[in-house]
Image (spheres, rainbow, N blue to C red):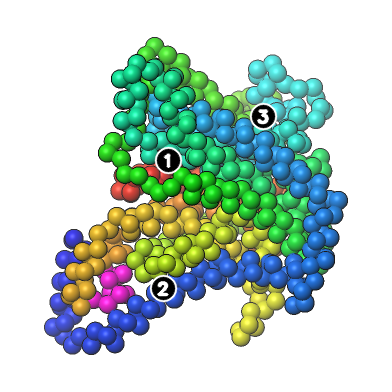
């Protein structure tokens, strides 16, 4: 209401000096312009790249010729990579479902203490980049591991790292994607009425019985959806299969595309476009299955009292809390201690001690080495630019989706969500094909420039940027807009003086969320970078391939510190946001 009063005062002052234009001539063009602008941006970022990808695969040279695409999809290497992708994604999804489900129930239905820091730490393990997680576990189980040496469990010198290959990929992806499952299940738990638990308690049911016979059956749609989300995340994961699979030639579809494109360059684009469509098709199976589950679940039901913790642990409460912290120590603490020890030792195989401890590798990658310093700045500016632009766009987008599009809303949302739902490697190939030649009319090509990475980030993270503003817009009552209309405000004035101030906190959170995810991004930038536009993920991967594990560890630790700082800033802003926007605030 304060925003409406402020707008009324400003417009009143304006009317004293400037006569108001006739209402129909001012309002109608803007009323039509906003929906048209929303649809145009959605098509540009979400529709056009994938249309170009399909044309390159099935109609090279603008002639329909699907034979080459089908041959690429059914080749021996493509079939093997597809089977590897399905195998690792399915098994890691099952592992993530088990681990994430246990954590979600422990934090959602019991009276365990310290839920907020536990949830924050658990989600943080997912927010760090997949390649950082893979590098941390590689360091932990390496023959020269300082942590295992302290525990007396160090492998034989010169032995192979047990995480390289299929088993390591499955294990690390399961651990990395478990928070996705927990977040999905926390959302489902909030929708269960507490009256179900009270009715069961009146019948004498204990907490274990209530969980097994009431909570889990009610959560069945969320359990299926969570497993499918973990499966789709596994299909599109590049960082973990790249660090754990490429050294032993265990290829999944994203790493196969990376190897083909890095080996043969633009000449392999028709083949890689077909492989990218194959990745998208595998991921789409999981997405469509998830949509089918959501439709069966039906619409949202308003409940008077949401589920509250009903499992009183009593004397077992400290033990359960200790078990969860131990899980986090294995999942996060020990691997990062191994990374830190590798970054603080002067050379491979030198035991870490007060005498050998050195920060030279941190100084090397943060201050002296030009390519790593440039990568930090590139990652910062790419992530920050995408965050700022998307936060500004999200305000008008949220208003347009919630108030103006009507029946067009769902189709537009589906188009917008394509780049975020499908694996990043699919978007990267689509952007290469879209911008390889100069742009029409202006004759300028952005291929090989920073702008192609920025475009890909804008397309990929727009759905993430819209989440908080759309949720906030749904809670704004229409009387604010009605008051502005009665005062003679046009659509753009209303957006500026009414909608924007109200949505500003949500847009700020969107910016931080986009920055959080984009700063460590690798899947898209691994295929789009060129000399001078390297990102942190690309440099970390390159250093590891070059055998400079200590420098790669220093970059991983530094990048994770930035992510932690961004998450803490988000948590401070969380009190001013709609509920359930930040996944760890349970």
Secondary structure under badge 1? helix
Which quarter of the figure is the C terminus placed in? top left
Q: Main secondary structure of the magenta part?
A: helix
**Residues under numbered marks 3 and 1 in contact, where contact means CB atoms less than 8 Å apart:** no
Mark identifier at residue 35: 2
Q: Residue 510 appears in which quarter of the rendering? A: bottom left
Looking at the rendering, the stretch of residues picked out in magenta corresponds to 489-497
Q: What residue is shown at x 58% (from left), y 51% (from top)?
A: 287
Q: What residue is shown at x 41% (from left), y 44% (from top)?
A: 582
Q: Is residue 489 left or right of residue 362?
A: left
Q: Mark 1 = which residue?
A: 187
Q: Mark 3 = which residue?
A: 140
- Label 3 vs 1, first from the N-terminus: 3
Q: Position of residue 142 (x, y in %)?
A: 73, 29
- Label 1 vs 2, first from the N-terminus: 2
Q: Is residue 20 left or right of residue 272?
A: left
490 drawn magenta: yes
Secondary structure under badge 2? helix
- Label 3 vs 2, first from the N-terminus: 2
Q: Position of residue 583 (x, y in %)?
A: 43, 42
Q: Nearer the viewer, residue 240 or 86?
A: 86
Q: Residue 141 appears in which quarter of the rendering? A: top right
Q: Nearer the viewer, residue 279 or 293?
A: 293
Is residue 394 among what the camera can see?
yes
Number of other residues with Cα within 10 Å of mark 2, as a class: few under 14, some 14 to 19, many 20 or more = many
Is residue 416 among what the camera can see?
no
Q: What residue is shown at x 78% (from left), y 47% (from top)?
A: 81
Q: What residue is shown at x 62% (from left), y 43% (from top)?
A: 231
**Residues under numbered marks 1 and 2 in contact, where contact means CB atoms less than 8 Å apart:** no
């Amino acid at each position: 209401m304060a925003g409406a009063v402020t707008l009324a005062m400003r417009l009143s002052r304006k009317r004293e000096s400037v006569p108001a234009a006739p209402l129909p001539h001012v309002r109608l063009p803007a009323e039509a312009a906003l929906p048209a602008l929303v649809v145009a941006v959605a098509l540009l970022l979400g529709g056009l790249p994938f249309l170009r990808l399909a044309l390159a695969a099935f109609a090279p040279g603008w002639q329909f010729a699907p034979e080459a695409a089908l041959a690429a999809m059914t080749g021996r290497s493509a079939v093997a990579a597809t089977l590897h992708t399905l195998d690792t994604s399915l098994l890691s999804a099952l592992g993530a479902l088990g681990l994430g489900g246990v954590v979600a129930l422990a934090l959602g239905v019991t009276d365990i203490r310290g839920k907020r820091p536990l949830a924050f730490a658990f989600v943080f393990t997912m927010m760090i980049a997949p390649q950082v997680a893979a590098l941390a576990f590689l360091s932990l189980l390496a023959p020269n591991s300082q942590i295992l040496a302290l525990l007396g469990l160090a492998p034989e010198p010169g032995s192979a790292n047990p995480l390289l290959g299929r088993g390591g990929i499955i294990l690390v992806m399961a651990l990395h994607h478990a928070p996705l499952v927990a977040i999905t299940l926390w959302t489902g738990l909030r929708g269960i009425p507490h009256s179900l638990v009270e009715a069961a308690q009146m019948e004498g049911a204990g907490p274990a019985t209530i969980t097994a016979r009431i909570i889990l059956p009610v959560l069945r749609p969320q359990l299926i959806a969570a497993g499918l989300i973990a499966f789709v995340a596994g299909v599109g994961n590049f960082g973990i299969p790249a660090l754990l699979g490429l050294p032993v030639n265990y290829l999944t579809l994203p790493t196969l595309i990376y190897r083909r494109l890095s080996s043969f360059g633009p000449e392999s684009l028709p083949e890689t476009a077909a492989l990218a469509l194959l990745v998208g098709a595998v991921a789409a199976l999981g997405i469509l299955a998830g949509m089918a589950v959501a439709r069966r679940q039906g619409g949202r039901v308003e409940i008077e009292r949401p589920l509250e913790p009903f499992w009183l642990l009593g004397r077992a409460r400290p033990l359960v809390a200790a078990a969860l912290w131990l899980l986090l120590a294995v999942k996060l603490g020990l691997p990062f201690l191994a990374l830190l020890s590798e970054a603080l030792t002067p050379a491979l195989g030198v035991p870490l001690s007060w005498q050998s401890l050195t920060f030279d590798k941190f100084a090397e990658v943060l201050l002296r080495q030009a390519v790593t310093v440039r990568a930090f700045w590139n990652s910062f500016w790419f992530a920050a630019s995408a965050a700022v632009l998307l936060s500004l766009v999200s305000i008008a987008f949220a208003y347009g989706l919630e108030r103006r599009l009507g029946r067009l809303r769902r189709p537009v949302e589906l188009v917008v969500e394509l780049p975020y739902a499908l694996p990043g490697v699919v978007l990267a190939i689509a952007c290469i094909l879209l911008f390889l030649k100069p742009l029409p009319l202006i004759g300028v090509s952005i291929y090989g420039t920073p702008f192609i990475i920025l475009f890909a980030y804008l397309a990929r993270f727009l759905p993430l940027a819209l989440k908080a503003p759309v949720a906030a817009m749904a809670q704004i009552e229409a009387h604010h807009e009605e008051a502005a209309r009665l005062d003679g405000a046009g659509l753009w004035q209303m957006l500026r003086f009414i909608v924007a101030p109200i949505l500003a906190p949500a847009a700020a959170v969107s910016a931080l969320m986009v920055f959080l995810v984009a700063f460590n991004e690798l899947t898209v930038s691994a295929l789009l970078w060129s000399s001078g536009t390297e990102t942190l993920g690309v440099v970390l991967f390159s250093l590891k391939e070059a055998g400079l594990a200590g420098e790669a560890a220093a970059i991983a630790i530094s990048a994770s510190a930035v992510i932690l700082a961004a998450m803490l800033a988000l948590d401070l802003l969380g009190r001013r946001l709609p509920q359930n926007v930040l996944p760890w605030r349970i």
